[in-house]
Amino acid sequence: MDVYKIIGGNRLKGTVKVSGAKNSAVALIPASILANSPVTIGGIPEISDAFTLKILLEEIGGEVVFEDGKMTIDPRNMTPIPLPNGNVKKLRASYYLMGAMLGRFKKAVIGLPGGCFLGPRPIDQHIKGFEALGAKVTNEHGAIYLRAEELTGAKIYLDVASVGATINIMLAAVRAKGKTIIENAAKEPEIIDVATLLTNMGANIKGAGTSVIRIEGVEELHGTKHVIIPDRIEAATFMIYAAALGDGVTVDNIIPLHLEAVTAKLREMGVKVEEGEESIFIPKTDILQAVDVKTLVYPGFPTDVQQPLSVLMTQAIGASKITETIYTSRFKHIDELRRMNANARVEGNTAIIQGPTKLHGSKVTATDLRAGAALVLAGLLAEGETEIHDIYHIERGYSHFVEKLQSLGANIRKESITVSTVERAE
Ligand SMILES: CC(=O)N[C@H]1[C@@H](OP(=O)(O)OP(=O)(O)OC[C@H]2O[C@@H](n3ccc(=O)[nH]c3=O)[C@H](O)[C@@H]2O)O[C@H](CO)[C@@H](O)[C@@H]1O
Ligand SMILES: C=C(OP(=O)(O)O)C(=O)O
C-alpha cells in the first residue's frame, strides 16, 4: 500500500504551478465522444481520474494518446459498449459518459459512479434531464440503462444547481433536435470550459456561466483543439498551505477571479494575498484570526476547499466555524484531525474549530480527496512524523502533488509499505 510520510515543521517558499482543472478535465474528456474527428485537449492534469477516463474511452473503442499533459482522443471507432462495472466505479465523473454516449449513440449502459463519499450523492437531476430530452432511463442492478429513439430539446428546471447535471444535460442536448433550456443551471467556471469546447466542436450554446443555458441542437460535432482552465481548487489548496506555512509562495497559472471567495476569506483571517494577472503571491503570515465560513455554489465559497481550510483554522486565534450547505456531512476529516490533536468538533452541518493548536504527527487516513489535502497540511504543520493512508483519493485530484510540495521545501515522500491484517482492521 502506498502512503505519504511527512515530517512536519519545514517552511514553504518558492513558486508552484497549478495544473489544469480536474473537474473540467473529467467532463472535457467524455465530451470528445460527441465528435466525428479527433479532439485534442491541452493541460490535462496527470491525475488518476484522467488516466481512468482514458481507459474507459479505450474500452468503448476510442484511440487515446496522453502525453506531456496533452490528450488526443479519436472517437471515430467508438461504439456504445456497456460499462456497468469496473473502472466507472473509480471516479464520480464517469456519469458524464451517460450524457455523452446518449448524445452520440442514443443509448448507454453505465454503472453508478464512484468518487468521494461525501454523504448521499444522488443523480436524480441528471436523469430528470435525460428523460425530458426523450430518453427512457432505468436503474438495473446498480447500472443506469439509457435509450432513446431520438433526443428532442426541452425546458429543464434543475431542483438543485448541480454541476454534474448541468454538464450532463448539455452533453446530451448538443446533438438533440431543437432547443433545450436549462434553468437554475450551475454557474461554476468548469461549465463554461465545457461549453467552450463544445462550441468549438460546432455546438450552439448560449448562457453557460449563468443560471439559464440555451442550447440549439446540431446534427454533427467535429474535432477541435482546446486548452483547459487552471484548477481553482488546487490553487486554493496551495494558497491555504502558503498561508499556514509560507515564507513567500507564488501560486502560478491561475485565474484570480475564480478564487475571489477564497481570497476574501483568507484576507479576513489576516493573510496578505497579492493578486497578479495569472498568479497570486502570499507572503509570510504572522497571525491568523478565526473566521466563519459557509460553503455555497459558485461564486460562493467552494465546498471542495473547506476541508483544507479547516486545518488553517487550527492555527488561528479563536473559534472558527464551517457551515457546509452542499454536502452536509462532509466532515470525515475532522475525526482524523482530532487524532493529530486538533480541537475540533462537528455539530450537524457545522464544524467548530478552536485554535491555535500544536498538531502532533500521527497515522491517519485520507477518507476522501480533499480530506487528504487537509491531512497533508496537518502533517506539514505537525510535530514529528505523519503517515497518510489511502492516498489514492488524493491522487484522483492532485497532479504531481508530492513533487510540487518538495519543490517548495516540504519534507514529504511517497512510500510503499506492507500493512498487517491487524493494522488494517484498526
Ligand atoms: C466531478 C466534479 O465536478 N465534482 C464536483 C461536482 O460534483 P457533483 O457534480 O457531483 O456535485 P453537484 O453540483 O451535482 O451537487 C451539488 C448538490 O446537489 C445535490 N444533487 C446533485 C445532483 C442530483 O442529481 N441531485 C442532487 O440532489 C448533491 O447531493 C449536492 O448536495 O460539484 C461539487 C459541488 O461543487 C464538487 O464538490 C465536486 O468536486
Ligand atoms: C468531491 C470531489 O471530487 P468528485 O466529485 O470527483 O468525487 C472533489 O474534487 O473534491
Image (cartoon, rainbow, N blue to C red):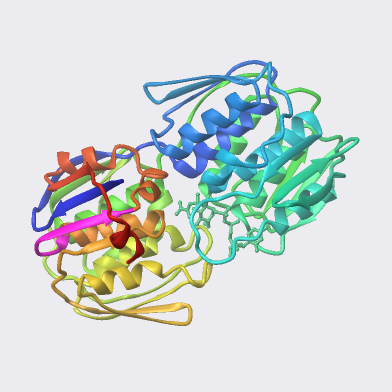
Quadrant of the snapshot with the C terminus: bottom left
Rendered-image quarter of ligand 1: bottom right
Is residue 132 rendered to the left or right of residue 14? right
- From the viewer's perspective, is residue 398 above or below residue 291? above
**Residue 121 in which image quadrant:** bottom right
Q: Residue at x 44, y 63 (%)?
A: 301
Q: Nearer the viewer, residue 70 or 191?
A: 70
Taking the magenta stretch, the answer to whether it contains residue 160 is: no
- From the viewer's perspective, is residue 352 above or below residue 140? below
Q: Which residues are magenta?
A: 381-389
**Residue 81 in which image quadrant:** top right
Taking the magenta stretch, the answer to whether it contains residue 387 is: yes
Q: Residue at x 84, y 45 (%)?
A: 133
Q: Residue at x 89, y 35 (%)?
A: 150
Q: What x and y, as percent, mark residue 208?
A: 63, 45
- From the viewer's perspective, is residue 307 above or below residue 45? below
Q: What x and y, as percent, mark residue 273?
A: 24, 56
**Residue 207 seen in this snapshot:** no
Is residue 287 rendered to the left or right of residue 54? left
Count how many numbered circles sit on residues in the image. Answer: 0
Q: What x and y, as percent, mark residue 417?
A: 23, 46
**Residue 176 seen in this snapshot:** yes
